[in-house]
Image (tube, rainbow, N blue to C red):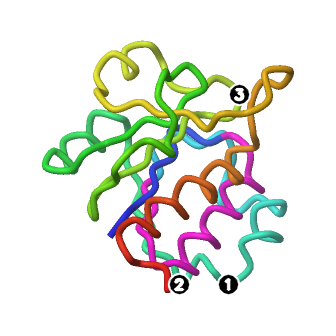
Amino acid sequence: MISIALYKPDIPQNTASIIRLCACFDMMLHIIEPCGFSLDDSRFKRVVMDYININNLKRYENFNKFKDENIKKRIILMTTKAENSYTNFIFKRDDILLFGRESKGVPLSIHSEIIDKLKIPINKKTRSLNVAMSVAIVSSEALRQNKFLK
């Protein structure tokens, strides 16, 4: 199944929305620590509601532990710095879609490690989408391609 990874998320409401999305579509969510907030944060709890109990959620101490535990899977970095669009990419059933920190993305060291990098084409007058929207857009296409959406 397609899964989502968040690198050091720092906005609780976005992470909570992504947890709900993953629960609704039965996707695994990988959270690479540290988060910029506590899972006890009231803003997080208000959005996540009881979906945190439904979701397949796995937390990792750091990126290396995440990478080591998912060595056989293809990790695809979603970044505004990519050349290729997600619409021209063929997703596989066990891909992990990695989204960077809202405030800073991922470090250059991670950029250089990952082969597959994709972007969501947007208006050139704007910088980026909200990370939760980006997760919804790209995961929808990956799920559709792999016949997970009916």
Quarter placement of the N terminus: bottom left
| Residue 43 in the figure: left or right of residue 104 | right
Q: Nearer the viewer, residue 136 or 107?
A: 136
Q: Disc 2 marks which residue?
A: 54
Please tell me how crowded label 2 is: few (under 14), some (14-19), or many (20+) other residues with Cα within 10 Å.
Answer: few
Q: Disc 1 marks which residue?
A: 50
Q: Against 63, is 6 above or below? A: below
* Real-space Cα separation, disc 2 to disc 1, in angstroms: 7 Å
Q: Position of residue 120 (x, y in %)?
A: 61, 38
Residues at badges 2 and 1 in contact (C-beta under 8 Å)?
A: yes
* Real-space Cα separation, disc 3 to disc 2, in angstroms: 28 Å
Q: Against 82, is 6 above or below? A: below
| Residue 33 in the figure: left or right of residue 115 | right
Seen as rendered, the residue at the extreme front is 88
Residue at 43% across, 74% down? 56
Residue at 67% across, 84% down? 50
Magenta residues span 10-30
Q: Nearer the viewer, residue 1 or 8?
A: 1
| Residue 109 in the figure: left or right of residue 102 | left
Residue at 55% across, 83% down? 53
Identity, as a three-letter code, of the amino acid under mark 3: Ser
Q: Disc 3 marks which residue?
A: 103
The numbered mark, 3 or 2, whose residue comes first in the sequence reads 2
Check if residue 55 falls in the magenta segment. no
The label shown at residue 6 is none
Identity, as a three-letter code, of the amino acid under mark 1: Asp
